[in-house]
Image (cartoon, rainbow, N blue to C red):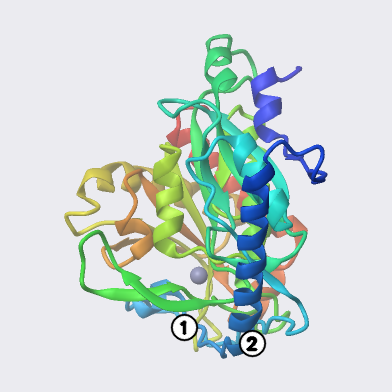
Amino acid sequence: MARSRVARRSTKRERTKKNVTWLTVAIGAVAVVALGAAIAVAAAGVKSAAVDGSTVDISEEILAGGNSEDLAPTAVPDAATALIEVPDVCGMQLEEAETLLAVAGFSVLRVSTPAGDAVPGTVLTQDPQAGSKIGAGSDVSLVYADPEGVEEQASTGTNASTGLVVCIDPGHQSQANLDPEPIGPGSNEMKPKVTGGATGAVTKQHEYQLAFAISLKIKERLEAKGVNVVMTRVSDAVDISNRQRAEAANKVNAALFVRVHADGSTNGDIKGISTLYPSGNSWVAPIEARSLRAAKLVQAAVVNATKAQDRGLSARGDIAGFNWSKVPAVLVETGFLSNPVEDKLLATDEYQDKLADGIAGGILTYLGLQ
Ligand SMILES: [Zn+2]
């Protein structure tokens, strides 16, 4: 059956590479100033890229005292690539944001989401985040409030938009950022913004790549059921802290914040799937019960779909990406990259499909959509 216009639109990414010429862009002096700023940040970006050192690669859950360990080195950026700092366009009107980004030298991907309480046309989240340094011509994804998304929710049919938003967070990124951030709102306790993640014992696949591949498959399945999906990142070369990932889910008022990871251990025999949920502190008290319910459903469904070893649920009060979340959240550890057999399995399209079937199934049950 044909999908509603809103469902189609929310899954479509429009590429809007703007042709900036001094005659056609009606921004005159603004463009000149913005271009100057872009050149300035580009110069700063190059300088900073050159002094970027090596990073230690330890996942958030491990630093938090978990039982897994991953110590593989992160990818080293190509020193020859000139990097440009991404400007902050959150809160701007879409057109204004696109113009600014085009002038700075980026391509723009539009991702619509129902406007809700937001001012129509406002950019709600951007990926990469402001201050990230990426190559000229790279994509910047903008999630914006779509006023028509709300109007059309009334006429829901099969596969039409449900009006529900799920935020999927593919774990980690191609380069860790070990700068500190508070473990929760108002806390003096710090954790690295985002760590490098695990690496496959045999395949050498990176956790951030695997998490992204599985996340896309989950997104596809949820969208087929009329769920609007917002991704915290749409590429690997981003710089988004765990706090910022939670805030992205908060901004779109996600019905569920789903974080996709893979595990690692110094013991290569350990294998299986576990689901983490927020618990045990005042930050997460408002979301704990709903998160636990979601975690139970997701864990049961993903174990059933994959027949992997069931490592159960893990209640966590020490995860920044949970403590900053105001919406129910779960983190699925989809298997152990340190286990040679599971590593090879995780690398296959077929197994990733099973994982996505299970995780999406659990989410849909939680949302009352199946
Ligand atoms: Zn991880």
Q: Earlier in the sequence, mark 1 or mark 2?
A: 2
* Foreground: disc 1 or disc 2: 2
Question: Is residue 109 toward the left or the right of residue 113 in the image?
Answer: right
Looking at the rendered structure, the kind of residue marked 2 is Ala
Task: Name the residue beneath numbered marker 1.
Answer: 69
Q: Nearer the viewer, residue 212 or 30?
A: 30
Residue placed furthest toward the front: 29
Question: In this orientation, does residue 258 appear?
Answer: yes
Asked which secondary structure carries label 1, the reply is: loop
Identified at 67% across, 66% down, the residue is 39
Numbered circle sitting on residue 144: none
Based on the displayed image, in which of its 4 quarters is residue 277 positioned? bottom left
Numbered circle sitting on residue 50: 2
Q: Nearer the viewer, residue 148 or 322?
A: 148
Where residue 63 sits in the image (x, y, percent)? Answer: 37, 79
Question: Is residue 315 toward the left or the right of residue 105 in the image?
Answer: left
Within 10 Å of disc 2 (Cα), the crowding (few <14, some 14-19, many 20+) is few
Q: Distance between the Cα atoms at labels 1 and 2?
A: 29 Å
Q: Nearer the viewer, residue 119 or 6?
A: 119
Identified at 78% across, 83% down, the residue is 80
Looking at the rendered structure, the kind of residue marked 1 is Glu
Residue placed furthest toward the left: 282
Where residue 257 sits in the image (x, y, percent)? Answer: 44, 47
Asked which secondary structure carries label 2, the reply is: helix
Identified at 58% across, 81% down, the residue is 48
